């Protein structure tokens, strides 16, 4: 594999609206990010992805872009953005922006001009169809946020436009080369300005099955999830390859795709040596147990389920390229609340989850506040929910027969608001996020449980310091052969409650072994191995715990190690 500049880096996602507010208006901003760059450097982050900060009416929190070339005043100015790029460069850090080009905002100039002249140049930037009174819509697809993907074009009774997300997010017509040229011009403009690359939003959706067609309904509303269309989709690679060659490749940019529903045989095309992207996220665990019929019917994921999802991805990707490993992001609930069973959520178990995902083969990502162990926020009423996807999911569950209590419980588990609550900097008012009124409620556990940076910085045994140790370990040149470029080989994958794997390089082999049970258990080491060094553990490894394992295989039994409940060890063999 050709070594790339980003392979040994650590990536960190910032949700700007909730990161740090520098001016007291209750909304995080670019100056707030600049003020905290030294914190991120101290943590060990190198690549910083900013969720959208472009001009937007915020129908979907910035993923509805009204101007690709300007910063929304809520977040600052273009001068602030240039300052951020310069300050990051001075610290050897790299800035990514969110590339949202499946759709724009209905307030974008392109769409406004399309409404004025649907048959003109800008009308062809979108999917606009004529539907006369009494005629059926072009297809029965359901948008990701509920309801038909078709809405009336403003000012026209007989024309409809396509939106696979919110109705204020009209889809861009990638079949139109004129539209693609505008997109490439914008991408290159940002890369020339100093961006290191992009996280690429919802990109598989840019290719539609044409001509539009109906599919069998999957709910009583007569509609079908738009994801059904993706199963029949062909040719998206033509667009992605062209975008790569015209923009990313000449700039040696780092790109990571939000890719769902990819076909296994297409992985080399996405992230192989000449892939469309540098990397893409592993969403296997995040989509586990989802139900199209409503969040209230979605299954909880067990530690064994999580392990199996992760190992399946590791096997599927192998050495084709670098996957991006996450336990949470701005669209998901908090990882510790999802992957650690209720009642067992404490510092040690959070450290276990951190080590297990972080040391997998691929690029590790940290979402803001994850390093503190931030958790889901409790909801007492649907009126407390801001997220449009959660509000739709609540309504879907009620329509499917769930009680309000059951529907709210499901929202509490899966709402995107869980990840979007303000970063918990300190025990001060509003967790130190703002001196004003925060745009979204702060999780009260910044006080009740001491989950805030100020407290964890002062505690050498905190999750925050454990993440710093994980980052230092992965960046240690002595272990790059194993932890960056080595194979990931599952070990004891058939044992319930155990997540264990080898990172095997040419020169070194490292064993990551974790016990997801509350009770202690004794586990064998790989045959013929002995422990050379304990590189990391979330408990003190005493002499009694390591004696049998350190001696190697004895005549009458194999080497073994006893792990406490929720213990994880990282062992150099």
Image: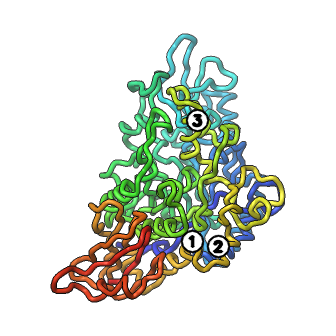
**Label 2, label 1: how far apart the Cα atoms are:** 7 Å
Using the image, determine if residue 42 lies above or below residue 255.
below
- Residue highlighted by disc 2: 456
Using the image, determine if residue 549 lies above or below residue 307.
below
CB under 8 Å between discs 2 and 1: yes
Residue at 40% across, 63% down: 517
Any mark on residue 66, and which? none
CB under 8 Å between discs 3 and 1: no
Using the image, determine if residue 341 lies above or below residue 529.
above
Query: Number of callouts in the render?
Result: 3
**Residue at disc 1, secondary structure:** helix
Crowdedness near tag 2: few (<14), some (14–19) or many (≥20) residues, C-alpha within 10 Å: some
**Pointer 2 or 1: first along the chain:** 2
**Label 2, label 3: how far apart the Cα atoms are:** 35 Å
Residue at 66% across, 21% down: 156
Residue 558: give x, y in percent of width and height: 21, 79
**Residue at disc 2, secondary structure:** helix
**The residue positioned farthest toward the top in the image shown:** 134
Q: In this view, does 534 lie to the left or right of 383?
A: left
**Residue at disc 3, secondary structure:** helix
Any mark on residue 405, and which? 3
Any mark on residue 463, and which? 1
Camera-nearest residue between 442 and 65: 442
Q: Is residue 391 visible?
A: yes
**Pointer 3 or 1: first along the chain:** 3
Residue at 67% across, 36% down: 106
């Amino acid at each position: 594999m050709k070594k790339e500049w980003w392979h040994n880096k650590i990536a960190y996602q910032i949700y700007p609206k909730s990161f740090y507010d520098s001016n007291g208006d209750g909304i995080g901003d670019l100056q707030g990010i600049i003020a905290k760059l030294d914190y991120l450097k101290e943590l060990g982050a190198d690549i910083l992805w900013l969720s959208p900060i472009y001009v937007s009416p915020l129908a979907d929190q910035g993923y509805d872009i009204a101007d690709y070339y300007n910063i929304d005043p809520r977040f600052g100015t273009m001068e602030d953005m240039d300052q951020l790029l310069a300050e990051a460069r001075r610290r050897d850090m790299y800035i990514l922006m969110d590339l949202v080009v499946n759709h724009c905002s209905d307030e974008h100039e392109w769409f406004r001009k399309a409404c004025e002249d649907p048959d003109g140049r800008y009308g062809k930037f979108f999917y606009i169809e004529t539907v006369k009174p009494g005629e059926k819509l072009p297809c029965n697809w359901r948008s990701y946020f509920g309801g038909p993907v078709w809405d009336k074009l403003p000012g026209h009774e007989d024309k409809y436009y396509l939106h696979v997300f919110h109705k204020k997010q009209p889809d861009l017509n990638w079949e139109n080369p004129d539209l693609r040229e505008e997109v490439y011009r914008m991408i290159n403009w940002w890369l020339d300005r100093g961006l290191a690359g992009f996280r690429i939003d919802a990109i598989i959706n840019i290719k539609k099955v044409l001509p539009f067609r109906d599919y069998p309904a999957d709910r009583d509303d007569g509609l079908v999830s738009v994801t059904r269309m993706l199963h029949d989709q062909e040719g998206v690679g033509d667009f992605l390859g062209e975008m790569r060659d015209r923009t990313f490749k000449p700039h040696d940019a780092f790109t990571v795709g939000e890719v769902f529903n990819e076909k296994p045989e297409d992985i080399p095309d996405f992230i192989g040596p000449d892939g469309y992207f540098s990397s893409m996220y592993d969403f296997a665990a995040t989509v586990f147990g989802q139900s199209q019929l409503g969040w209230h019917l979605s299954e909880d994921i067990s530690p064994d389920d999580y392990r199996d999802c992760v190992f399946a991805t590791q096997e599927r990707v192998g050495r084709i390229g670098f996957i991006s490993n996450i336990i949470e992001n701005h669209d998901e609930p908090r990882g510790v609340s999802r992957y650690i069973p209720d009642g067992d959520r404490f510092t040690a178990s959070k450290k276990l989850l951190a080590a297990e995902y972080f040391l997998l083969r691929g690029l590790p990502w940290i979402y803001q506040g994850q390093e503190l162990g931030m958790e889901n926020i409790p909801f007492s009423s649907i009126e407390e929910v801001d997220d449009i996807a959660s509000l739709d999911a609540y309504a879907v569950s009620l329509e499917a027969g769930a009680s309000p209590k059951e529907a709210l419980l499901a929202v509490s588990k899966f709402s995107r608001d869980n990840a979007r609550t303000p970063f918990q900097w300190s025990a001060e008012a509003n967790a130190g996020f703002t001196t004003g009124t925060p745009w979204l409620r702060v999780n009260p556990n910044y006080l009740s449980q001491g989950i805030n940076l100020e407290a964890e910085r002062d505690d050498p045994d905190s999750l925050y310091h454990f993440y710093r140790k994980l980052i230092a370990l992965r960046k240690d040149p002595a272990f790059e052969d194993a932890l960056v470029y080595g194979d990931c080989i599952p070990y004891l994958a058939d044992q319930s409650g155990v997540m264990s794997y080898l990172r095997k390089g040419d020169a070194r082999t490292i064993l990551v072994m974790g016990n997801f049970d509350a009770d202690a258990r004794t586990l064998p080491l790989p045959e013929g191995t002995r422990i050379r060094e304990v590189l990391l553990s979330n408990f003190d490894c005493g002499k009694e715990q390591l004696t049998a394992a350190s001696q190697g295989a004895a005549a009458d039994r194999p080497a073994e190690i006893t792990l406490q409940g929720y213990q994880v060890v990282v062992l150099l063999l």
